[in-house]
Image (cartoon, rainbow, N blue to C red):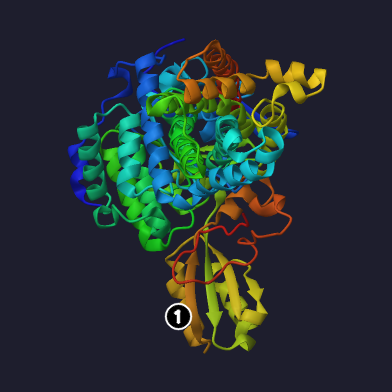
């Protein structure tokens, strides 16, 4: 602590120009700064990436060889159906971790500082969620790579596969707002996981991710067909296998937008209340 | 709303209720711009809650407060542009390095990438953290963490800084360094509102002090006014031969004219001391009586005594584990020991 502080002079409070609102540009800037923090954290704690590396490998192997013969007759026939399904399921499951980590993060003192800064209230949350898209990207890449190793050759070509991957990442980011909301309102990280899986399992398994819809009883068929996850799975299949951007893709994006529109404000409000 | 630049903080009747606990129960504070204001009180008195409300981290359940004339409820974003907050537990990111922390907070304060780098380097140097800049924070000592925390609060050069127990848990040397830093801060024109459990800290730093207990301000004034209301220091003697205690008590009664308190097991004798000059007389008398003194200390009023005087109960009353016993059982350390030990 040298004496150089005396070179600073403080501008008195009364002589500052101040505003009580945050612009959209500032909100974006703040969120990106917070995302930068998230990326540094991911780099510092690589062990937190175990789930996104191991899960795609194990799930892809497991589901392919368990269900392949029973559902599609052969593994090779099942892969074009399964890989998009497993991709969506894996990445959405990964987004639960976002809520859990947010809960742990929020209990730390640094969130007090974030709250005391004149930044957009949403920035610490949006930044954390944005940084986690890196995790989704890793899971997406590994799932496609595993599929490729097992013999999956997407008919749509590389470009379409990349678009499909981006679609999944975007939708998972939207869905992660649901888990972020649980993260903010829950008392502990463990309970976040508990509630989140209650939402996650029906959402991912009651979809067309693993089985053809027409094998299901009528009530389930109805739910599977309205489930946004089904639309996302169909959109990814169409993109990866035939390189077509179908109405299912648009429905998925619309669903994602609706989720963000509902859960982002809810989450921010709960976050601000929670002090 | 009246605009005022004379007052950095004006709070009237602030209330915060947690369940059925009225943590802050009608606190009034007026902090003049450019001064250091100390909020003194034991754990659980409502100090931190008060600061958190003023710093817009917590919504008050009642009352009004302004920071440089800006209402904390209606204009929170403006208030945040005027304050820096350093919490009781360092509010920096553990997984980031010191530099990364300061760059992040600089960016969030609106500095460009280049300016953020420059500012961080500058602050690290100023707070003696340059060598540790790239080290992970997990390896930082408590003092280093606190310094980094304070540095982070100064990025925007806020005219008002909240320091919540800035030296709790620090060793004496680091505490003295922290005090120096706070003094320099004030010399640059900053207003400081600090909370503390230590009477001497408030004494050393604060222009005015509010004593807070169970959510209300029980006394307010300068350090001098406060001490005068509390009473005098006490003299503490430890005798080489505990058997001489009774004779020593007589000597104290004769010379100082006051009744002393004995702790026979420790061979210790404590007496209120109003006139430091008379100590010489007492020591001469003890020598003449052949009573050998092993240790001599002057004890400033402890926070517990301040509390006893102001509220009629000791600061530790609320704590079932009974951590605070400073008043009944003062520790004869070298010099003054005006600390209050309370359980957390």
- Tell which of A144 and A201 is nearer to you: A144
- Tell which of B251 and B165 is nearer to you: B165
Q: Residue at x 75, y 33 (%)?
A: B20
Q: Residue at x 61, y 31 (%)?
A: A179
Decide if residue B223 is on the left or right side of residue A84: left
Q: Can residue B168 be seen from the camera position used here?
A: yes
- Tell which of B264 and B158 is nearer to you: B158
Vertical placement of residue B15 versus B95, above or below: above
* Residue B301 rendering spot, x and y as whole percentages: 53, 57
Q: Can residue B8 be seen from the camera position used here?
A: no
Vertical placement of residue A238 versus B330, above or below: above
- Rendered image quadrant of residue B191: top left
**Chain ID, mark 1:** B
- Tell which of A45 and A52 is nearer to you: A52
SS type, badge 1: helix
Task: State the residue position of label 1.
Answer: B284
Q: Residue at x 56, y 57 (%)?
A: B340
């Amino acid at each position: 602590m040298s004496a150089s502080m005396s070179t600073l002079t403080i501008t008195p409070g009364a002589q500052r120009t101040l505003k009580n609102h945050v612009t959209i540009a500032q909100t974006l800037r703040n969120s990106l700064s917070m995302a930068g923090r998230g990326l540094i954290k991911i780099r510092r704690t690589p062990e937190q990436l175990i789930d996104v590396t191991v899960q795609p490998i194990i799930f892809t192997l497991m589901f392919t060889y368990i269900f392949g013969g029973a559902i599609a007759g052969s593994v090779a026939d099942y892969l074009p159906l399964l890989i998009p399904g497993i991709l969506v399921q894996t990445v959405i499951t990964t987004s639960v971790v976002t809520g859990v980590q947010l809960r742990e993060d929020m209990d730390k003192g640094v969130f007090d500082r974030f709250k005391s800064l004149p930044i957009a209230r949403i920035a610490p949350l949006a930044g954390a969620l944005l940084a986690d898209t890196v995790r989704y990207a890793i899971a997406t890449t590994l799932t496609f790579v595993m599929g490729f190793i097992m013999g999956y050759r997407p008919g749509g070509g590389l470009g379409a596969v990349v678009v499909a991957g981006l679609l999944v990442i975007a939708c998972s980011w939207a869905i992660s707002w649901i888990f972020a909301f649980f993260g903010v309102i829950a008392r502990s990280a463990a309970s976040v996981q508990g509630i989140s899986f209650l939402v996650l399992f029906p959402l991912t398994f009651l979809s067309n991710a693993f089985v053809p819809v027409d094998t299901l009883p009528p009530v389930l068929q109805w739910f599977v067909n309205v489930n946004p996850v089904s639309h996302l799975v169909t959109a990814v299949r169409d993109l990866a296998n035939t390189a077509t951007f179908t109405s299912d893709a648009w429905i998925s994006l619309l669903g994602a937008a609706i989720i963000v529109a509902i859960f982002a404000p809810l989450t921010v409000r709960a976050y601000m209340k929670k002090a | 709303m009246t605009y005022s630049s004379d007052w950095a903080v004006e709070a009237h009747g602030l209330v915060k209720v947690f369940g059925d606990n009225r943590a802050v129960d009608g606190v009034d504070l007026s902090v003049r711009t450019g001064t250091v204001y100390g909020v003194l009180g034991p754990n659980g008195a409502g100090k931190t809650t008060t600061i958190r409300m003023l710093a817009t981290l917590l919504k008050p359940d009642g009352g009004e407060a302004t920071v440089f004339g800006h209402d904390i409820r209606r204009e929170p974003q403006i208030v945040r542009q005027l304050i820096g907050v350093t919490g009781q537990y360092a509010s920096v990111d553990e997984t980031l390095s010191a530099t990364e922390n300061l760059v992040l907070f600089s960016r969030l304060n609106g500095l460009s990438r280049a300016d953020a780098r420059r500012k961080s380097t500058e602050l690290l140097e100023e707070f003696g953290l340059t060598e540790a800049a790239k080290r992970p924070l997990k390896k930082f000592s408590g003092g280093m963490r606190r310094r980094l925390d304070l540095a982070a609060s100064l990025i925007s050069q806020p005219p008002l800084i909240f320091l919540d127990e800035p030296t709790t848990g620090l060793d004496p040397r680091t505490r003295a360094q922290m005090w120096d830093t706070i003094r320099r801060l004030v010399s640059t024109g900053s207003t400081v509102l600090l909370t503390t459990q230590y009477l001497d800290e408030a004494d050393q730093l604060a222009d005015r002090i509010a004593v807070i207990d169970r959510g209300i301000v029980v006394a307010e004034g300068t350090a001098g006014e406060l001490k005068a209301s509390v009473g005098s220091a006490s003299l503490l003697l430890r005798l080489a031969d505990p058997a001489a205690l009774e004779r020593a008590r007589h000597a104290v009664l004769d010379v100082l004219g006051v009744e002393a308190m004995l702790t026979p097991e420790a061979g210790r004798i404590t007496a209120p001391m109003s006139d430091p000059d008379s100590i010489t007389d007492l020591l001469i008398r003890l020598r003449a009586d052949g009573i050998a003194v092993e240790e001599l200390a002057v004890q400033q009023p402890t926070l517990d005594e301040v509390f006893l005087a102001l509220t009629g109960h000791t600061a530790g009353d609320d704590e079932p584990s009974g951590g605070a016993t400073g008043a009944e059982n003062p520790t004869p350390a070298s010099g003054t020991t005006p600390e209050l030990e309370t359980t957390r």
